[in-house]
Image (cartoon, rainbow, N blue to C red):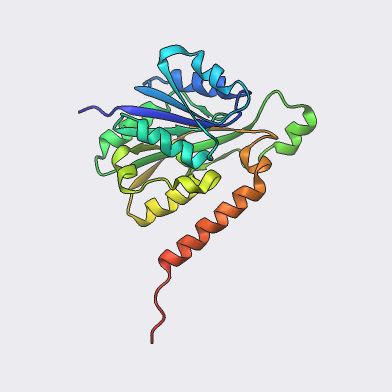
Amino acid sequence: MAETVSAIIAVRNGANYLRESIESMLAQTVAPDEIIVVDDGSTDNTAAIACSFGSVVRVVSQPNAGQAAATAHGIGLATGSCIAVNDHDDLWVPEKQQWQLAALAADPSLDLVYGLCEQFVSPELDEEEQRRFAPPTPILPGALLQAALVRRSAFDRVGIDPTLRGAGAADWMGRASEAGITRYMLDQVVLRRRLHPTNYGRTNAAERDKYLLSVLRAKIRRTATPTPQ
């Protein structure tokens, strides 16, 4: 049976870049079977932009609870046998789904397929910002949920913790590895990650660090061995 794909964007106040992100998902050589946008309490016109695509994009709203809770909400609504997650400001290359679905079909034991990530400075920024945000290494292995296609069964085994706000994806990746989720890295760029002044990690650095620290502590507790008596 052919895989079906539910694509999910969890977004708060992402009006500047959301349209481009959705368009990159709709432009896939193998289109997702559904796109779900979870509006996490936006105060701008994020929801209106998502709704402007009509029935090809399902839009749901929730009070602001953080990216992890919004992503978990979207996964709960998804009907596909595979899940793909994108950020509102990042872009999929056109062949992302085609390549990743082919890899899953070639190896039924795989739970997750990554690809490379190309970082780029958002083109509307001025010359000074272009220099400031220019990445030292433009292309990196995309060991990110946003660069992955994941079988739904993997999320059934290891769920996203909705309490972790911006650290939910990092926490999931660690727990998935510990749970034996099998993975493969393609040697093609599948995700273009936009760099700009309002990236979550820049505007919510204190919150991000707080939750990442809690993720690290939880991992240490899980992996610690009892002290011999």
Out of 144 and 88, give the one closest to the viewer: 88
> Relative to the observer, which residue lies in front, 62 or 190?
62
Looking at the image, residue 79 lies above or below residue 161? above
In percent of width and height, residue 114 lies at 42, 40
Left/right of residue 146 with respect to residue 103 in the rendered view: right
Q: Residue shown at 36%/26% (left/top)?
A: 98
Q: Is residue 140 above or below residue 221?
A: above
Left or right: where does residue 112 sit relative to residue 85? left
* Left-right relation of 120 to 182: right
Q: Position of residue 71 (x, y in %)?
A: 45, 37
Q: Quadrant of the N terminus?
A: top left
- Quarter of the image for residue 145 reads top left
- Frontmost residue, 175 versus 109: 175
47 w.r.t. 205: above or below? above
Residue furthest out toward the bottom: 229
Tell me if I can see residue 106 in this picture.
Answer: yes
Q: Position of residue 83 (x, y in %)?
A: 37, 34
- Residue at image x 60%, y 54%? 210
Q: Quadrant of residue 85?
A: top left
Dividing the image into 4 quarters, which one contains the C terminus? bottom left
- Residue 115, horizontal then vertical, whole percent: 44, 37
Q: Residue furthest front?
A: 63
